Image (cartoon, grey):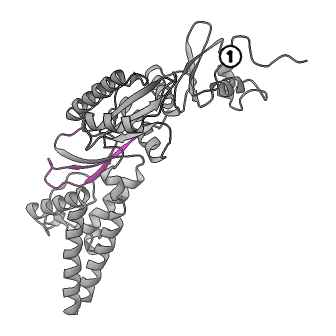
Amino acid sequence: MSSSPVPDWVPSDLPGAPGVYRFRNDAGQLLYVGKSVNLKRRVRGYFYGGGPDSDRLSEMLGCASEVEIRRTGSDLEARLLEARAILREQPEYNRALKNSGEAWYLEVDFSVPYPRFRVVQAARKSSARYFGPFRSRKLPRRVARLAEKIFRLRSCTGRLEPDSDGSACIQRGLGLCSAPCVKDTGLNDYREQMEAAVEVLESSSAAADVRADLAARRDEAAEELAFEEAADLQNRIEWLDELDGYRFALENPILDRSWLLVLPHARATHRLLMPVAKGRVLSTRSADWTDETRWRDAVEDVCYALRIAELRSPAALPREELVPSLIVSRWLEENADEGTVLPMDDLDAEGAVQRLREDRRDVA
């Protein structure tokens, strides 16, 4: 009978449960961090079938002499532990989070005379209004292009110095820009256009008002046989309708909201309380689910921490906090069924306790 390909330093009693694993070398240096819903299958699986297909992981296993595990109660907890370990310790052989922390914002900087939409990766200016974060550059770019066409805003880069004797770009000829560069539009009028665009991005009711106004002007132009003007207004209505299709992303219904996640714990008698304050994942707390006094006190404590964190919520999360935020938001979008999810925007600590008391199942 052939011997097992799994080396002796890999424990034989690995749990078939979710968790995080860490490979180290003889000097104790962290080589690689991973997570799995089944630690036993994942860790031992590295050594079967001739080893991993990746040369990088094969090299890592050749250097490894120890594996540590940390069991979790849920896949979400394991995802977060893995991400934070990679961000904090930057193991040599990990590449999984190379781009996962990227986020994009749509910026309007009102400190400049003729502001424009810019897609940026960091929200740093106190004078600017930001929309986001978005998970890709493509979506905010599309939103910006639509808003520019609807409100006839400039899309050119660089500092704008209006000159009535200058030459405007093709956007003016196409009726897509009000051309402040050649003084077709004054400073105050242009800023009003931008403020109207920002208001539409912020509010669906503002968008509805703008649409109604455009429709009325279109109908009036058509009655007066000004068909070119009517067609232009109809185009702007269609662009506005397309823009409204991105309302879910502009309002960030998940990422910017507050939640209390009550997740399974590695110990069957406990639960993991994970507060999320406006997208920011706070410190978790373990609660003994067999003792109502203890778990109620724990819930009240994390709800208090959540409210304090909301008051101190930054305009944009740094990368080390953004990555966990994106992980949780994706988990919520996937409608994961592990644990209990309490939306905390309109729920206080007492309400959270009552909801959990109603939903709580008996535990051993």
- Look at the image and give the residue range highlighted in magenta: 102-125
Residue 183: quadrant of the picture: bottom left
Horizontal arrangement in the rendering, residue 37 relative to residue 196 (left or right)? right
Pick the residue in front: 123 or 337.
337
Horizontal arrangement in the rendering, residue 168 relative to residue 255 (left or right)? left
Query: At which x and y percent is residue 179?
Result: 20, 67
Query: At which x and y percent is residue 109?
Result: 20, 48
Instruction: Reply above or below: 173 against 59.
Output: below
Q: Residue furthest right?
A: 1
Instruction: Return the residue at label 1.
Output: 13
Kind of residue indicated by mark 1: Asp
> Which element is circle 1 on?
loop
Horizontal arrangement in the rendering, residue 349 relative to residue 48 (left or right)? left
Query: At which x and y percent is residue 356?
Result: 37, 35
Which image quarter is the N terminus in?
A: top right
Pick the residue in front: 107 or 4.
4
Horizontal arrangement in the rendering, residue 179 relative to residue 357 (left or right)? left
Instruction: Kindly tell me whether residue 297 is visible in this rendering.
Output: yes
Instruction: Reply above or below: 107 against 45.
Output: below
What crowding class fits label 1: few (fewer than 14 Cα within 10 Å), some (14-19), or many (20 or more)? few
Instruction: Reply above or below: 164 against 318.
Output: below
114 falls in the magenta region: yes
Pick the residue in front: 140 or 335.
335
What residue appears at the point 27 percent right and 70 percent down from the top-left corner? 176
232 falls in the magenta region: no
Pick the residue in front: 289 or 175.
289
Instruction: Kindly tell me whether residue 152 is visible in this rendering.
Output: no
Residue 291: quadrant of the picture: top left
What residue appears at the point 15 percent right and 56 percent down from the top-left corner? 161
